[in-house]
Image (cartoon, grey):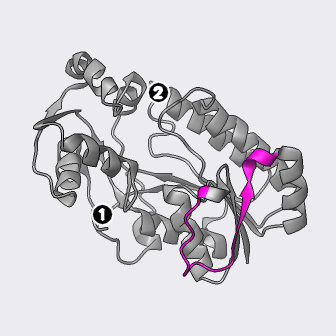
Amino acid sequence: MKALVAGGSGFIGSHIVRKFSYNRAKVWVLTRNPQKVQINPLVKGVSFIDLTEGWEYLENLITEIRPDIIINTVGILYEEKGNSYRKAHVEFVKKLLKVAQKVSPKRFIHISACGVGINRFSRYFKSKEEGENLVTSSGIPYTIFRPSIVMGKGQLLLKQLKRIGKLLPLLVVPKGSFQPLHVEDLAQAVFLSAVEEKLKNRICEVGGPKVYTAGELFKESLKLLGLKRLVIELPWQLFIPVLPAAGLLGVLNYEQLKMSKTPNVCPKNCLPKLVKSLKDPFEV
């Protein structure tokens, strides 16, 4: 099997690359910084393609490779100068699908987000929904995964908590609910969708074994880091005055707050049917 993974050097993407590599697939990773990627010596059969070379070069190279499976894990939670939600979740998907239509892969696997189609407040979710619509209307066999918050070693929330947890005696978080899953379970589900027909042309919500409040999620994450802090949950409206301080710490802005206005849970969770024994999301 030949697999092309866009965003394969990121948190979710790197675990997917390892899963495919361990199952003897030949993997090509699309990344902006191939020279900075830390390659695990145990991961074999992985090549890196520099996204900055331009799409004409990439189209020619991917057409030559002719991957059986194309996996898109590209996504951002925070907009930065030159990298908007629309650019990452819509325009990039459009370009990748254009290339995919030339090579006719057996499956286009797209990592979206739990909350798409439900949360109408956030530009993040609106852009994710638009990206999904591009995939489903492309004519290419697809599987779309909508994960709740994905946990595991290297996850952004854990990195942020490690930084700010040492500075603050307590944490104030907006109320919300989440169904965290372990990144290795998501990687396993992605691999199965590449080799089994039952997930063809399906959109799958994927979450872990338990629903957590925002307070519980942060407490479990702090415990994982060996930190004990008081965690206070505030209703959405009451959290707004706290936003400037959260923004200064670089952990939350108004757009992220809007993401929390709807539950991030998976009523139609596909994961237990795909992975027999779900991992504890807080196990690293």
- 33 or 106: which is nearer to us? 33
Residue at the image point whose x is 88% and y is 51% from the top: 57
Q: Give amino acid for label 1.
A: Pro
Number of labelled discs?
A: 2
In the image, which disc is placed on residue 20? none
Residue at the image point whose x is 51% and y is 32% from the top: 124
Q: Nearer the viewer, mark 1 or mark 2?
A: 2
Q: Is residue 204 left or right of residue 265?
A: right
Residue at the image point whose x is 42% and y is 25% from the top: 255
Highlighted range, magenta? 36-53
Q: Is residue 85 left or right of residue 253?
A: right
The answer to whether residue 202 is visible is no
Q: To which residue does mark 2 refer?
A: 122
User: Which of disc 2 and disc 1 is earlier in sequence?
Assistant: 2
Q: To which residue does mark 1 refer?
A: 209
Q: Give amino acid for label 2.
A: Ser
- 58 or 217: which is nearer to us? 58
Q: Is residue 81 above or below residue 216?
A: above
